[in-house]
Amino acid sequence: MQNLIAFLIRFRVFLGFLAFQTLCFFLYIQFVTYPRSVFFTGAGKVNGQLLTWENQFYHYLRLSEDNEKLQQENALLRGVTFDNYYQLQRPTLEKNDTVYQQRFRFIPVQIISAPTGQRNNYFTIDAGELQGIKKGMGVISSRGVIGVVFKVGKKYSLIKSVLTSDINIDVIVGKKQIRGILKWNGMNPRIGSITGISTDVYVPKWSEVRTQGSTGIFPKGILLGKVKAKRRMENQSLWDIDVLFKEDLRNVHEAFVINALFINEIEQLQQKIPTESIE
């Protein structure tokens, strides 16, 4: 208390001057029209700017929550697209109660680890058996194919990405839907390689490369990238085609695991294909 009294006594002149200046300023803007207008206009602008900053700050804090909601909505929208349904009603005498049946379901996940500097790169997602993830399921992002589920735990799973040496994805190229096999040569994570297309076939530069959907793991027509360049393979009548991936796998964070509802039927039928005996 003594220190406070000593402080007031020591600075009494300055404090008195400050009090009179404040009182004069208040009376000035209170009774003179123009200064009052300028003061309240400036105060309103400052207050508005502060409110704007506050609003932007709260929006920034909610980005993670909003992004999760958008991903959930995206999964629902993917589930109701026309290409995601299998047509039940065919030109036969039989009539079904419904026309289409859903072929794929999409499970939204987060990619928590995505190395791309190895010859074989495996990603980790934050979903496992508890979320219905199974080995062999396809994994996509909003911009392309990521890979296939390789190992499944209770809460997490490993994804064999397209950036591995032994993954093959059936694709179609261009408007003519030329069939080929997408691989990765282990060099540039932005560039894939397509083989299996004869040099007799004309493949224009920047043709779109999409999933073929023949295995039933991926829906048909998912865009993977575009043809960047092509060259003849040595001693073969085949093209070696470079594909520029649409998705930059070095910066992917959200994905969807595909639950192919008809995959068991497709696999059972393919197992019944007779093997040719060599005589």
Image (cartoon, grey):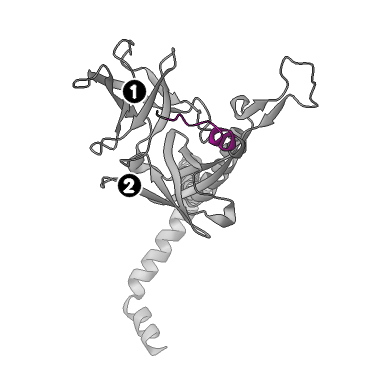
Secondary structure category for the residue under label 1: loop
Q: Residue at label 2?
A: 121
Specify whether residue 36 is in view.
Answer: no
Furthest toward the bottom, the residue is 2
| Residue toward you, 69 or 119 | 119
The answer to if 173 sits in the magenta stretch is no
Q: Which residues are magenta?
A: 266-277
- The span from disc 2 to disc 1 (Cα, nearest Å) is 24 Å
Q: Position of residue 229 (x, y in %)?
A: 26, 20
Identify the mark nearer the N-term, 2 or 1.
Answer: 2
What is the number of the mark on residue 1?
none
- Mark closer to the observer (2, 1): 1
Specify whether residue 119 is in view.
Answer: yes
Task: Residue at 62% x, 33% y: name it.
Answer: 103
Task: Residue at 26% x, 35% y: name it.
Answer: 185
- Amino acid under disc 1: Gly
**Quarter residue 78 falls in:** top right
Are the residues tagged 2 and 1 within 8 Å (C-beta)? no
The quarter of the image holding the N terminus is bottom left
Query: Vertically, is 181 above or below 35?
Result: above
- Amino acid under disc 2: Asn
The quarter of the image holding the C terminus is top left
Task: Residue at 52% x, 53% y: name it.
Answer: 127
Furthest toward the front, the residue is 279
Q: Residue at label 1?
A: 196
Secondary structure category for the residue under label 2: loop
Q: Alpha-carbon neighbours of circle 2 within 10 Å: few (<14), some, or many (≥20)?
A: some
Q: Seen in the image, is 251 located left or right of residue 151?
A: left
Q: Position of residue 97 (x, y in %)?
A: 81, 27
